[in-house]
Structure formats: structure tokens, C-alpha cells
Amino acid sequence: MTTRISLALVTLTAMATLAGVAHATSTLDTVKQRGMLQCGVETSLPGFGIPDDKGNWTGLDVDTCRAVATAVFGDPTKVKFVPLTPKDRFTALQSGEIDMLSRDTTWTQSRQSAQGLLFTGVNYYDGQGFMVRKSLGVTSALKLNGASICVQQGSTSEQNLADYFQTHHMTFKPVNFDNADAIIKAYDSGRCDALTTDASGLASERLKLGNPADHIILPEIISKEPLGPSVRKGDDQWFDIVQWSLFAMIDAEELGVTQANVDTMMKSTNPAIKRLLGVEGDYGKTMGLTNDWAYNIIKKVGNYGEVFERNVGSGSPLKLKRGLNQLWNKGGILYAPPLD
Amino acid sequence: MLARHMPLGFGFWHQTAGFDIEQALIPFAASSSTYGTAFFVGLLNTLLVAALGIVLATLLGFLIGIARLSGNFVVARLSAAYVEMFRNIPLLLQLLFWYNAILRPLPAPRQSLHLPRGAVLNNRGIMLPGPHAAAGSWPMALALVLAIALGAGFLMAARRSRKLTGYARGLGWWGLALALALPLATALAFGPPLHVTMPQLQGFNYVHGLSIYPELLALLLGLSLYTAAFIAEIVRAGIQSVARGQREAAAALGLPPVQILRWVVVPQALRVIIPPLTNQYLNLTKNSTLAVAIGYPDLAQVFMGTVLNQTGAAVQIVFITMGVYLAISLVTALAMNLWNRRMALHER
Ligand SMILES: N[C@@H](CCC(=O)N[C@@H](CS)C(=O)NCC(=O)O)C(=O)O
């Protein structure tokens, strides 16, 4: 039944697209009029985007949405989270059902050129890996010849998997599902020998298993997965807002501005901090926002490091290391252009 | 679409797919097959599950429908319970139930259950000894087509001759002999058309043989059991619509119960049964799109799922998919209407 409803929805969407319900008004105006940002997120991925039993969302991707809502409204609660399967996420963005997508989504050439998405940045540098049961005795992905592998439908993982096995002259049997819970269930019941997705996703999915310690993540990382928020093409102002909401969080960390000290930092004499917090210049106004846009993000959501640690780092069950996602001047590759 | 920066046209059809599909009835490889081939893989998987589902649901539905009218109280009650249970639980839940019910208790490949004749059962499905094409398969295919054509020709000639002269002149027998001799001779000349391979454990999985995956089993089971409940009701209504006097008259003539059913009740009941039966067949086919929930690679899953997601050609793909389901429905309805016409009362 659900499929038929979603079939009908996709059709309607498609027809609406055909009719060209064009963007007469800007996305920012639409969002303001609605009083709410509509942000596409995961259905359930601990640490990145997951609702609790009361419907409160948490996660790195979820907080990326909150940063944008805060930039626009000064209020991180003005977001409606729209859970999307990987398969449906692009259609939802193209059709205007959501204003932005912040959902574990890899920045690729075809998604940008052929699917009409614009990636505004990277909020998590990742790569694809494999998880297996310890009892299987497998220690390397190169030993997976002939294995049944559970994989997310409509993901880069699906293609990377085929590429990797072909390059290494191995075969595999794919078992595809359209949502994360079905994958983890099938893997848990032994339908697959291995589960593959982004390494962060593996760490996250492993938490859903009965005894996480029975499973290991293999050392091979077989792809580049720069994950980040994206918007529809054709609205440069909206692109700027989504892009700089993330950059502001990264710059804040670099400048040492935190949720706790942001108020005292208002008195800082550092010109970069003054510009970031709107004490100087019209950086907010040029994007159609108020000049305290970044101040609000840091105050109400936090800087990138804080958001990272809280959701996926040391303050979370995932305990992911910063690794590549450390700032560029601290050994990572996280690098936001200056707010000048 | 331009405004949405979505791809136009059907250029994607010939692009390399780049993803793999576990159950493919035609050769499919991520690195060399196209999105177009992926479409056909999905379509064939849909047709496969729909065809098998229709056969199973019909057999089971007729059985239960007839059992429900049985004089045996227990049998009648059990059938009624079956109908009430299966048609009142949402199909999606039933599918998820069967999928887990099949997967959970089954052992991993290395601990497989061994069935008679080399068949193997584990949580990757049922592996059977499987036929594979051999050197003789093309000549044999040709020989079979020829044999059928010749056989039919001879049979028709025999009929005409009987009509005209009253003698068949043994033509039918000649036809039959030819139809048998031709494939036999081909097999002798070109070698056997098929060779059978046995499932074999190799590393993680069984290879060779014929694998029936748990996704297909669960979908087939779910669709058939669910639809059978509706068909049973249709059959019951059909049988009850046949006047009691008909049955009594047949019994008075001394016909045994099975013959009464076969020659008196069923032909009349079918007139009532066929039209709503068509609806059930159409429903079963459309419901097969719930495959998505348990990862069976049907047309909706492969084409409207992965292919749409990768190419972004949403409008084209949705229209093609709708067109295909419409076509399948129309063909099914047409076939059923033809059958209905044959069964209808011919007033003289
Ligand atoms: N980064 C990859 C894969 C992302 C992905 O969808 N991963 C799945 C598997 S872990 C996921 O996020 N599932 C969570 C959900 O659906 O809620 C992509 O963009 O295609």
C-alpha cells in the first residue's frame, strides 16, 4: 500500500514538475512565509539523524538543518524534519517538498550535473567500508569473494561495491533494501555475510545490533564519501545561506568561539571574530539575513567541533575520532573559506 | 523539467548501470549492462512473481473455497478461519512476517539443511539442482518449434480429412511420431540440450544449481496466501450461485460427487467466478510492488528505485513504469475476458 501511495506521490510530483511550478518566489521568502524550514534528513541513523520516541531529532545532519533555521529565524526549533530514504531524497528536493537536504549524502559529479543538486559544502568526510560478524573469521575486504552483501538501494555504496569487486576480480551477491532498518535486520538475521556503507554509517548501524562487539569493521576504505548538505539549483541566495551556515560553524571553531564563550567574544578585538559575530560589517544583510545570523548559530547550535563531539564524537555512543574532520591546521582537512 | 535541472529524454537507457542485481533471469553485470537491461531484469522478475503467484493463489483459493462448503464441520470452519485471518491482516505486514519467518530459523550456508536429491536449504534460499544451457540447446529449441508446428499441421490435416471423408487416415499418429522423433534425433546428433549442475558450497555461498532466494519465496508466499483468501470467497459465492436442483438432478442420475463438481457445478459456477477473479489477478500483480519492502528486485524496486535515483530521470521512469503495469493489467484482463466468453452461456 505504501508503495502505491508513494508511486502516486512521485507521479504527482512528476506532473507538478512537468507543469513547471516554477520558483517565482525565492526559497528564503517561502521559508519565511511558512515560518519553518523543511529539511530532508535520515530516517534513522544514530549520531547523524534519528528521532527519539518523543519525536525529538538529534544528529550532526539534523544540527546542520538547525543552523540554517537559526540563521533565518534566530530559532533552532523552526525546522520540520522530513525523514527520507536514500532512494527518495533527490526527488523530494527537486519537487520542492524540502528546502534543503542534509542527509548523509555524498557529493558526486552526476548528482550535481544530472540531478540538479548543488552541494554547499562537506559536514563529514567519509569513505565506504564493510562490517562482518567476527565469527566469520574474515579480516580483509579482499577475502569477501562470493559473499552476500547487504547494501542500501539508491546509494553511492551500491556502485562503489560493484566497482570494488570488479577491480579486484571478485564476485558478490547484492541484497538491496531501501531503508537502513531493513538492511540491518537482514544482516542481523544472517541473510548477508557483510554489510557495506559509509564507515560512519557502519559505526552507527552497529549500535542497532544486539551485541555490537560481535561485529568488526574491516580495515579497507574503498571510496571517498564527502557528505554534505545540498540545495536545488537556481537560487543563489539560498545556496549562500545554507553554505555559510556551515562555514560559520567551522570558522567559529577555528577562531575559538564556542557556545559558552560567544557572549564574551562579542567584545573581542579580533577583526575576524567581530565580522563573524556581526559586530562589524553587513555580512548577514548581503544574504538577506540579520547580521547576528552567525552569532545565533553559535549560541543556539554550537560551533562545528561542539556539534561533532556531541553527536558522533566523544560525547556520543559512536565515539568517532575527528580524523579527516579535524580542522586543517590541526591535522585534518576541514577548511572553510574566511568570513571576510 | 529544465527549470528543475532534471535530465530530459531517454539517453539514460543506454548508459552503464554500475550496480548489481541478485536475481536476474537474463544476464546482467554491473560493469557492462545498461539501465535498459536493468529495466528488463526488473520486468521479468515482476512477471515471474505475478505468474507464479496467480497459479498458486488460484489453486489454493479454489481448494479453500470448495472446502468451505464441505459437509465436514471441521474442514468448513478451518477454511472460514483461513479466509478471515488472511484477508484482514494488511499485506505489507504479512510480507514482512513471512520474510522474517523464512530468514530467522534457517541456518547459515555452512550449516545448511540437506534435502533429498541434492537440494539445500539455508538463509540464502533454496538451492536446487539446476538446468543450464548446453551445446545442444539451440538446435533443440529449433527442433521443438518445428516439431510443434509439424505436429499441429498434421493434426489439423487429420481433422479436416475426418470432416470431409470420415477417415483420419492415421495422419494424427504420423504427426505425433514426427513430433517425438525430431527432438530425439536432435538430441542424439547435437548432444543433450541441458546439463544439470548440483549446488556446491564454495566459500560464503552455494554456487551452481538453481537458487531461489528468500525474497522471492517470501513475496510469493505472502501474495498467494493473501490473494487465495479472496479467491476462496469468490469461489464459494460462485458455487453457491448454482441452483441446488442442478446438483440434486446430477446425483439422481447417479454421477459420483467429483463428477458432479467437475461437469455440473464448476462450469456454471465459473460464469460467476471469472469476472471477480480477474480483479484478484490484477490486484496480485499490482500488490507485487510491495516487493520493495523486502528487497525483491521487481520492476518497481529496480527501475523506479535504483535507476530513478541514479539517473534522476523521474518523469520518464515513472511514466514508463505506469505504462508497464497498465499493459500487464490490460493483457491479463483481455485473457480473462476471452476465457469468460468461452465459458459464457451460449444461447441457441
Ligand atoms: N553516502 C551515501 C550513502 C548514504 C546512505 O544512504 N546510507 C544509508 C545506510 S547507513 C543511510 O544513511 N541510512 C539511514 C537512513 O536511511 O535513515 C550516499 O550518499 O549515497
Image: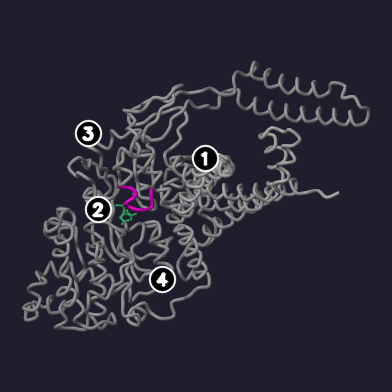
Residue in the picture at 22% in, 34% down: A135
Query: Closer to us: mark 4 or mark 1?
Result: 1
Q: What is the span of residues highlighted in magenta in the rendered image?
A: A177-184
Residue in the picture at 58% in, 41% down: B70
Tags 2 and 3 both on a single chain? yes
Mark 1 Cβ inside 8 Å of ligand 1: no
Quarter-of-image position of residue A124: bottom left
Distance of label 2 from label 3 (alpha carbons): 27 Å
- Determine if the magenta segment contains residue A157: no
Can residue B30 be seen in this snapshot? Answer: no
- How far across and down, in percent of the image, does residue A256 sit? 9, 69
Q: Mark 3 lies on which chain?
A: A
- How far across and down, in percent of the image, does residue A201 sit? 26, 52
The residue singled out by tag 1 in the image is B75
Query: Closer to us: mark 2 or mark 3?
Result: 3
- Up the image or down, B183 lies above or below B303; here it is above
- Image quarter where the C terminus of chain A lies is bottom left
- Up the image or down, A145 lies above or below A92; here it is above
Query: Closer to us: mark 2 or mark 1?
Result: 1
The residue singled out by tag 4 in the image is A96
The residue singled out by tag 3 in the image is A135
**Which residue type does callout 4 highlight?**
Gly
Q: Is residue A1 left or right of residue A125?
A: right
Direction right: furthest residue: B165
